[in-house]
């Protein structure tokens, strides 16, 4: 599915990001392709192997006792590794000085690092990368401005290389000291090995994604919540507003997450990691991060920790600073927003009653709000520090501990904000007992504004079906409720229909509207959906009334296979299949590096058409030339080769290939199967001129599966076939034996 946002505008927005919020600035290290550049292997720092099962058992025992966090995913090795006492230096032909150090944590699922000293002069860069060729960086002077400590998110695998590059004239100006090497023993979405771990969705099944309808009333507060990586542990927390409404990045979390951890200058705060759809959970970018904070207060009385982030979240993060209530009034209901088990952001609700208690959940007595049960969702390890909001959308506490989980959804305890507030009022200011939230990019609604915000359930390529049934998201951006609207839809510029919608959408809420099923011919199409006549009136903002998607219909098809025989540097290789009109139908890569190269098979959905296959190499040496003898091939499910190529192509090779009813080339007339009548309702007669040499006749569906077969006796030249039990559509009839094969397409119609 292709959308039509202004990509250049998005790119400009990213370029406009204040340096204070950026973690990396792109570029390429030298050592990820050391072999090609003639560089010697990096010096290796070895660490002891760990017993993952024992560490996980310790975590689960702590969790069972009611301690909510931090959610531990890694074991921290305390080290002192600097540019002076470890690694090795090399000088490149252009004069750049390069320092490299490989860290080996046997059996680790991931590795992340903390630097106690991070001083990089302007013009120098630092990278980290693993053996699979995944690269993070370049990290520069602007990655953590005003601070001399740093932290990076986990990178998959048990070997990680740190590389620091100083251009000529900057020699000796940089200072880097690694203070903690975190051996990951749980997967938390770091891409260690393809298909081996979950990138998201590892929290309990009762958790609810924030994009679901349960989050509709809490869109602003959701934007205030972040996941915190504190070395080898994960917690949650929220931005808080102050009386000046000035976007100072004050942040509330739990004391038991931060106490005795003095690496706060290298903690990583991740905002906006949220599933884009309600169900099933889908992954999302994890690039809205800020590194480092100052500890302002850790107070045992309510297990509160009050921080100030190293920089203010920039405009493209769409930050929101939550309001608060320091009155101590008992709430009617509460809502929590958090990252359970470090997972993608979730929301939970309790409809009361809410009480008060003093409890020791593993790190001392604290005065808390008591949530006896959750009616929607739950909390888990990693939720620690996350706020609860009352019915007035104001923070009244942060999670301390409790027993709640999907299997035992009772008893959670939140440190009381009303008792913490006197300790932090010097920073938040004194403006009464309550303060509403602050939105720096506050949206000013117009009187009546209905918008189409998305079109779902339309795949980019509709494989072996001529029908789509889209789901449209209708949003109310106006000041009052919307109870009626017309949903108009058109395909390829031709109006298809109008659906009158009735219901109630409150301001800033959404609803999903199903469109009727539409049968479309083979080829590329555009669906455009428009909302009109909200409340039988004129929409005061027509600019957001329409959305469109472009997609392919491939019916009938045979699924084909793209086989990539990679060289050792899979990270350099990508491929794509485009239609003659330039529509991207399928793509693959980059892949992981491997010491011996390997083969990747990818199924693709093709139709009776011609395509352009393009393979690219980032370095320009193809998949060959001393690094492995690579090649590529496209075949259909009958084994017919549609395209074949070797790895000697430089930067790029493009080849046209055509699919004759998905690659099936029928034999000449004297060898062909003749089927009559064709198409019909399934009662066929097949005439077999070469029957003496044939032994079997079979029918295959569009996926290559055999759905019917018969033996053919010697001398038999006619076969009556009853395929009426099969579904409507196209099939391939294959007759073979004695070293010969003939094929014919048959179509079953009602």
Image: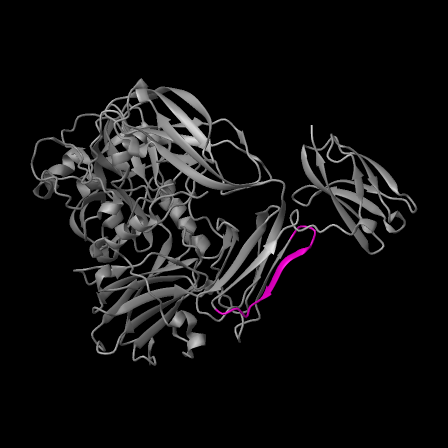
Q: Which of 158 and 290 is in front in this view?
A: 290
Q: Residue at x 52, y 73 (%)?
A: 627
Q: Where is residue 117 in the image (x, y as percent from the top left)?
A: 22, 66
Q: Is residue 402 above or below residue 76?
A: above
Residue found farthest to the front? 494
Give the extent of the magenta segment: 636-650
Q: Is residue 122 above or below residue 55?
A: below
Q: Which of 367 and 110 is in front in this view?
A: 110
Q: Main secondary structure of the magenta part?
A: loop
Q: Is residue 554 above or below residue 81?
A: above
- Does the magenta-highlighted stretch encompass residue 376? no
Residue 618 occupies quadrant: bottom left
Q: Position of residue 653 (x, y in %)?
A: 52, 64
According to the image, what is the colour scheme of the structure?
one colour
Classify residue 68 as left or right of residue 57.
left
Q: Which of 294 and 469 is in front in this view?
A: 469
Q: Residue at x 60, y 56 (%)?
A: 657
Quarter of the image where the C terminus is located: top right
Classify residue 669 as left or right of residue 371.
right
Residue 77 occupies quadrant: bottom left
Classify residue 219 as left or right of residue 133.
left
Q: Position of residue 431 (x, y in %)?
A: 7, 34
Q: Can residue 305 be seen in this view?
A: no
Q: Where is residue 474 in the image (x, y as percent from the top left)?
A: 36, 29
Q: Is residue 379 visible?
A: yes
Classify residue 115 as left or right of residue 727.
left
- Does the magenta-highlighted stretch encompass residue 639? yes
Q: Residue at x 36, y 22 (%)?
A: 485
- How many marks are shown on the rendered structure? 0
Q: Nearer the viewer, residue 360 or 573?
A: 573
């Amino acid at each position: 599915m292709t959308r039509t946002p202004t990509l250049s505008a998005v790119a400009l927005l990213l370029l406009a990001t204040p340096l204070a919020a950026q973690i990396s600035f792109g570029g390429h290290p030298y050592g990820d392709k050391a072999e090609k550049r003639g560089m010697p292997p990096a010096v290796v720092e070895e660490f002891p192997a760990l017993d993952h099962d024992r560490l996980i058992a310790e975590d689960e025992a702590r969790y069972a006792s009611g301690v909510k966090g931090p959610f531990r995913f890694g074991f921290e090795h305390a080290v002192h590794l600097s540019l002076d006492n470890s690694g090795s230096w090399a000088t490149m032909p252009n004069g750049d000085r390069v320092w490299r150090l490989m860290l080996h944590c046997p059996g680790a699922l991931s590795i992340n690092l903390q630097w106690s000293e991070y001083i990089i002069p302007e013009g120098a860069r630092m990278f980290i990368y693993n053996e699979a060729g995944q690269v993070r960086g370049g990290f520069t002077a602007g990655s953590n401005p005003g601070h001399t400590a740093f932290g990076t998110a986990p990178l998959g695998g048990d070997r990680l290389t740190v590389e620091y590059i100083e251009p000529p004239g900057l020699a000796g100006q940089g200072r880097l000291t690694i203070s903690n090497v975190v051996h990951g023993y749980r997967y938390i979405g770091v891409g260690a090995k393809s298909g081996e771990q979950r990138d998201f969705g590892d929290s309990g099944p009762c958790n609810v994604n924030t994009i679901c309808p349960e989050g509709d009333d809490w869109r602003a507060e959701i934007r205030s919540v972040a996941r915190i990586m504190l070395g080898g542990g994960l917690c949650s927390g929220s931005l808080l507003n102050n009386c000046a409404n000035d976007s100072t990045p004050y942040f509330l979390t739990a004391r038991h997450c931060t106490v005795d951890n003095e690496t706060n200058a290298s903690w990583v705060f991740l905002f906006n990691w949220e599933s884009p759809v309600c169900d099933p959970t889908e992954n999302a970018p994890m690039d809205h991060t800020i590194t480092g904070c100052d500890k302002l207060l850790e107070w045992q009385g309510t297990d509160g920790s009050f921080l100030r982030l190293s920089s203010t979240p920039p405009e493209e993060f769409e930050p929101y600073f939550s309001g608060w209530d320091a009155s101590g009034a008992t709430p009617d209901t509460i809502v929590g927003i958090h990252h359970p088990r470090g997972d993608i952001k979730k929301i939970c609700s309790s409809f009361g009653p809410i009480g008060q208690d003093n409890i020791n959940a593993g790190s001392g007595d604290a005065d808390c709000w008591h949530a006896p049960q959750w009616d929607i969702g739950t909390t888990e390890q990693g939720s620690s520090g996350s706020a609860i909001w009352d019915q007035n959308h104001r923070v009244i506490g942060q999670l301390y501990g409790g027993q709640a989980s999907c299997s035992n959804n009772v008893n959670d305890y939140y440190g009381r904000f009303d008792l913490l507030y006197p300790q932090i009022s010097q920073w938040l200011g004194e403006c009464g007992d309550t303060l509403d939230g602050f939105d720096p990019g506050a949206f000013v609604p117009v009187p009546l504004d209905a918008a189409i915000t998305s079109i779902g359930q339309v795949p980019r390529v509709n494989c072996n079906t001529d029908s789509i049934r889209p789901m449209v998201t209708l949003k109310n951006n106006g000041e009052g409720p919307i109870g009626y609207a017309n949903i108009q839809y058109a395909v390829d510029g031709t109006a298809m229909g109008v659906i009158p919608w009735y219901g109630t959408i409150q301001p800033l809420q959404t609803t999903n509207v199903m469109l009727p099923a539409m049968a479309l011919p083979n080829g590329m199409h555009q669906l455009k959906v428009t909302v009109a006549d909200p409340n039988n009136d004129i929409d005061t903002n027509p600019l957001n009334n329409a959305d469109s998607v472009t997609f392919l219909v491939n019916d009938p098809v045979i699924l084909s296979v793209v086989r990539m025989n990679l060289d050792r540097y899979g990270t350099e290789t990508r491929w794509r299949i485009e239609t003659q009109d330039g529509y991207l139908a399928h793509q693959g890569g980059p892949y992981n590096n491997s010491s011996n190269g390997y083969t990747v098979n990818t199924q693709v959905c093709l139709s009776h058409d011609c395509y352009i296959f393009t393979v690219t190499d980032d370095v320009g040496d193809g998949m060959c030339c001393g690094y492995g003898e690579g090649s590529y091939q496209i075949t259909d499910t009958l084994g017919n080769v549609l395209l074949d190529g070797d790895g000697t192509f430089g930067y790029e090779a493009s080849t046209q290939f055509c699919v004759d009813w998905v690659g099936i080339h029928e034999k000449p007339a004297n060898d062909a199967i003749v089927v009559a009548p064709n198409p019909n309702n399934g009662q066929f007669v097949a005439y077999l001129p070469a029957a003496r040499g044939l032994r079997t006749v079979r029918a295959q569906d569009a996926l290559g599966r055999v759905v019917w077969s018969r033996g053919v006796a010697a001398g038999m030249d006619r076969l009556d076939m009853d395929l009426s039990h099969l579904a409507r559509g196209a099939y391939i009839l294959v007759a073979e034996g004695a070293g010969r094969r003939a094929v014919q397409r048959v179509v079953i119609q009602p």
